């Protein structure tokens, strides 16, 4: 199967080292998404985006046609207008397209305050373009089910890739008597209700004389935690930053366990069912136990239960109890369970098999 790469640029050019590693022709399409939604009125932004698309199609068409590519594989973010770009390239190059969906467009529109009329319009366009795709892949089984129910699209689950396939148990590095549970990533509406509940659990335990801290490793400023967690979060939470994989590894050395909390808020229901937490790929490979918490139908809890993970909870009472069970699960047998799930779903071999089956169907 021949391929080429079209990078949808928003902030900075496609890195030269990545171009060299791909060893494929690279075409660039500059998007205005990096400017933010509030910078331009939507009518002007759509007009300029359309003109940019026509211009870059003209620039890239010869390069991509000469590459010998036989199909388009599109990685989509949360912006539903990207579907226009995919269809335009497909028509211009006369090639079928596959698309990989990671964020539900409708949920993203509502989260950004889009009007009901725009949400309705986007849903119609989304269904129309997805039904034109030769193959649709989705980031979670819940997203696959949603696409089938909402649009009649038969998608295929394609898990996130994890390069490291065999994980080794890692003892915790403890410099004092404090037990530290780590959370990696942004603090936003998808996770905040679970984080708040966990903080309350720790407060109650600390009031009984136990020593606990939640360590948030994130690029988010302290003001963002103030917004979502309230000004008292510093009593229980430490905020750390890691700008590289090595810094992340050093920052998380003291992790007794990792926290993966999904929100039970009704407004987050569709997102927690269809999304899949990329932070889990960091957790799975570090050799430490993982506390998975959320609604029973959330993608994280479903995944954990289907793969026989320990320390899974759907209520805060269960999550509190699981804190006492970390010691029981702090062993190589638990990490072997994580390693098996990586090999089964996230390894290069597993993903190549999924793509090969899609290409032949």
Image (cartoon, helix red, strand yellow):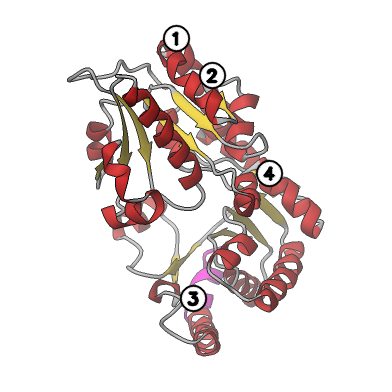
Q: Nearer the viewer, residue 322 or 91?
A: 322
Sequence-earlier tag: 1 or 4: 4
Residue 308 sits in quarter: top right
Sequence-earlier tag: 2 or 4: 4
Sequence-earlier tag: 3 or 2: 3
Image coords of residue 197 (percent x, y): 47, 37
In magenta, the rendered stretch is 59-70
Residue at 45% of width from left, 36% of height from top? Answer: 281
Image coords of residue 23 (percent x, y): 41, 54
Instruction: Give the residue at mark 3.
Output: 60
Image coords of residue 90 (percent x, y): 64, 70
Q: Is residue 328 left or right of residue 134?
A: left
Sequence-earlier tag: 1 or 3: 3
Residue at 33% of width from left, 18% of height from top? Answer: 170
Instruction: Give the residue at mark 1.
Output: 328
Q: Nearer the viewer, residue 75 or 194?
A: 194
Determine the CA span between mark 2 and mark 1: 10 Å
Determine the CA span between mark 3 and mark 2: 50 Å
Mark 4: few, some, or many residues within 10 Å (few <14, many ≥20)? Answer: many
Q: Main secondary structure of the magenta part?
A: helix
Q: Secondary structure at mark 1?
A: helix
Determine the CA span between mark 3 and mark 4: 36 Å
Instruction: Give the residue at mark 2.
Output: 310
Q: Nearer the viewer, residue 217 or 351?
A: 217
Instruction: Give the residue at mark 4.
Output: 142
Residue 276 sits in quarter: top right
């Amino acid at each position: 199967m021949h391929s080429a790469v079209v990078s949808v640029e928003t902030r900075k050019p496609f890195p030269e080292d990545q171009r060299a590693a791909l060893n494929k022709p690279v075409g660039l399409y500059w998007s205005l998404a990096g400017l933010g939604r509030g910078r331009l009125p939507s009518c002007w932004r759509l007009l300029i985006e359309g003109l940019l698309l026509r211009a870059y199609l003209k620039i890239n068409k010869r390069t991509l046609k000469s590459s010998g590519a036989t199909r388009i594989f599109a990685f989509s973010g949360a912006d539903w207008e990207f579907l226009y770009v995919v269809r335009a390239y497909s028509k211009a190059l006369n090639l079928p397209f596959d698309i990989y969906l990671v964020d539900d467009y409708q949920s993203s529109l509502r989260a950004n305050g889009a009007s009901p009329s725009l949400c309705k319009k986007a849903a119609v366009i989304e269904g129309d373009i997805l039904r034109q795709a030769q193959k649709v892949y989705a980031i979670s089984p819940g997203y696959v089910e949603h696409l089938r129910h909402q649009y009649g699209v038969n998608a295929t689950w394609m898990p996130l890739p994890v390069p490291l396939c065999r994980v080794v148990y890692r003892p915790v590095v403890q410099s004092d008597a404090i037990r530290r549970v780590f959370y990696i990533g942004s603090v936003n509406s998808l996770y905040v209700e679970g984080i708040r509940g966990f903080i309350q659990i720790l407060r109650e335990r600390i009031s009984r004389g136990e020593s606990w801290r939640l360590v948030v490793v994130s690029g988010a400023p302290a003001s963002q935690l103030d917004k979502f967690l309230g000004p008292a979060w510093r009593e229980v939470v430490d905020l750390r930053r890691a700008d590289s994989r090595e810094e992340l590894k050093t920052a998380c050395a003291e992790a007794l366990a990792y926290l993966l909390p999904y929100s039970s808020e009704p407004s987050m229901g569709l997102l927690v069912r269809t999304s899949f937490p990329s932070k889990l790929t960091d957790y799975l490979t570090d050799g430490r136990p993982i506390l998975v918490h959320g609604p029973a139908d959330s993608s994280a809890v479903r995944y954990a239960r289907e793969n026989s993970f320990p320390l899974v909870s759907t209520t805060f009472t269960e999550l509190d109890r699981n804190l006492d069970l970390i010691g029981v699960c702090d062993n190589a047998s638990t990490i072997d369970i994580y390693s098996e799930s990586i090999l089964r779903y996230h390894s290069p071999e597993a993903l190549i098999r999924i793509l090969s089956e899609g290409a032949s169907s």
